[in-house]
Image (spheres, rainbow, N blue to C red):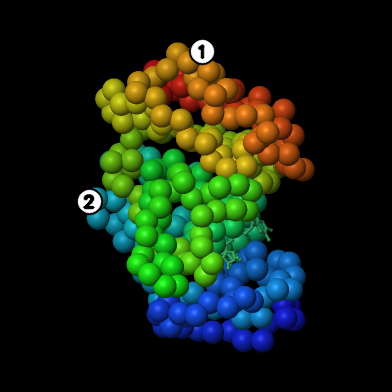
């Protein structure tokens, strides 16, 4: 789509060049959402591509993804085999309602900042206990747990003009066993429910991450493997009816039903 309100595109070499944030500015990542609908309040795009951030850096402590890492680059990256939960990268890349454009241009950071319930990069990084580095326009960089970033449907903790710089995934989370469940109403459609369980070996606790079903990610931590009743009680306590999402991709009742159903499957799979 042509954005006919845009008067300028800035191409900074460093994010520090954008000190004084103004109304009408927008960071431009892959542009798959920005160019998909009118942006009548935006007059200046600030292209993140010219920052030249290295997409992926992997070491013994974990993986660092630049916010500008594209989904295609992420999908092509294969973490070491001993990081079993690294397979979640492929699962979550395939969890987009994806087109050629989304696959090749959308970025991890753009998806996280959109903060849509069906954002698979949110599911991935929350389940893998990620930490985001945020760059405010004035002041020091700050770190936020992925689990605390999204606060509602299309809402998050970013301050005005704040930039998501990178995502750190710890090796300890990548080394865990995992179970993945996802539902979509249409073939290759948007996720209506996406649950991920991880468990440290040999007898670690269960970490259950519930996304897409709810307006924001919900994460439940158990010391060991809960009983079926304990799991149900924990979901009851954590998810009031009001935060199950209601849209064309699934009713709250449908999403609620599948949340309990998949959670029990994950409990059994990781408890086996
Ligand atoms: C056909 C189609 C299917 C889609 N399917 C899905 C889907 O299944 N799930 C889903 O969640 N979304 C989906 N989307 C929405 C969107 O395209 C994706 O969320 C995509 O990942 C956004 O990434 P991007 O890099 O293109 O972001 P952009 O469009 O460039 O930016 C999105 C927003 O984030 C801001 N932004 C981007 N990067 C940063 C950063 N590093 N720091 C601060 N702000 C930033 C931008 O200013 C803008 O407000 C879909 C869109 C289309 C058109």
Relative side of 253 to 232, left or right:
right
Q: Secondary structure at mark 2?
A: loop
**Residue found at the far front of this picture:** 139
Residue denoted by label 1: 229
Residue 36, which numbered label?
none
Residue 101 is left or right of residue 271, and the answer is right
Res. 13 image quadrant: bottom left
| Figure check: 122 above or below 203 | below
Nearer to us in this view, 195 or 140: 140
For label 2, being within 8 Å of ligand 1 is answered no
Q: Residue at x 47, y 67 (%)?
A: 163
> Which is more foreground, mark 2 or mark 1?
1
Q: Are marks 2 and 1 in contact (CB under 8 Å)?
A: no
**Where does label 2 land, which residue?**
60
Q: How many angstroms separate mark 2 from mark 1 (CA)?
A: 38 Å
Secondary structure of the residue carrying numbered label 1:
helix
For the question of whether residue 113 can be seen, the reply is yes
Residue sitting at x 59%, y 57%: 114
Q: Hey, which quadrant is residue 58 in on the image?
A: bottom left
Taking the image in four quarters, ligand 1 sits in the one at: bottom right
Considering the image in quadrants, where does the N terminus appear? bottom right
Q: Is residue 152 above or below residue 210?
A: below
């Amino acid at each position: 789509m042509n954005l006919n309100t845009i008067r300028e595109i800035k191409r900074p070499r460093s994010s520090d060049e954008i000190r004084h944030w103004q109304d009408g500015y927008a960071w431009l990542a892959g542009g798959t959402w920005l160019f998909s609908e009118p942006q009548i309040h935006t007059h200046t795009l600030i292209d993140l591509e010219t920052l030249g951030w290295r997409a992926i850096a992997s070491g013994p402590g974990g993986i660092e993804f630049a916010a500008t890492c594209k989904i295609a680059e992420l999908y092509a990256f294969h973490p070491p085999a001993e990081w079993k939960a690294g397979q979640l990268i492929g699962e979550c890349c395939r969890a987009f309602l994806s087109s050629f454009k989304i696959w090749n241009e959308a970025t991890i950071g753009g998806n996280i900042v959109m903060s849509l319930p069906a954002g698979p990069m949110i599911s991935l990084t929350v389940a893998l206990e990620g930490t985001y580095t945020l760059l405010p326009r004035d002041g020091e960089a700050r770190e936020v747990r992925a689990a605390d970033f999204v606060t509602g449907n299309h809402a998050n903790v970013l301050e005005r003009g704040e930039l998501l710089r990178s995502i750190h995934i710890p090796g300890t989370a990548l080394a865990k066993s995992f179970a993945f469940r996802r539902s979509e109403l249409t073939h290759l459609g948007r996720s209506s429910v996406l649950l991920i369980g991880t468990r440290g070996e040999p007898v670690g606790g269960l970490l259950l991450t519930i996304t897409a079903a709810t307006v924001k990610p919900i994460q439940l931590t158990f010391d060991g493997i809960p009983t079926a009743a304990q799991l149900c009680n924990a979901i009851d306590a954590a998810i009031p009816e009001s935060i199950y999402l209601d849209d064309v991709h699934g009713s709250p009742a449908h999403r609620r039903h599948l949340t309990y159903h998949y959670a029990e499957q994950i409990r059994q799979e990781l408890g086996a």
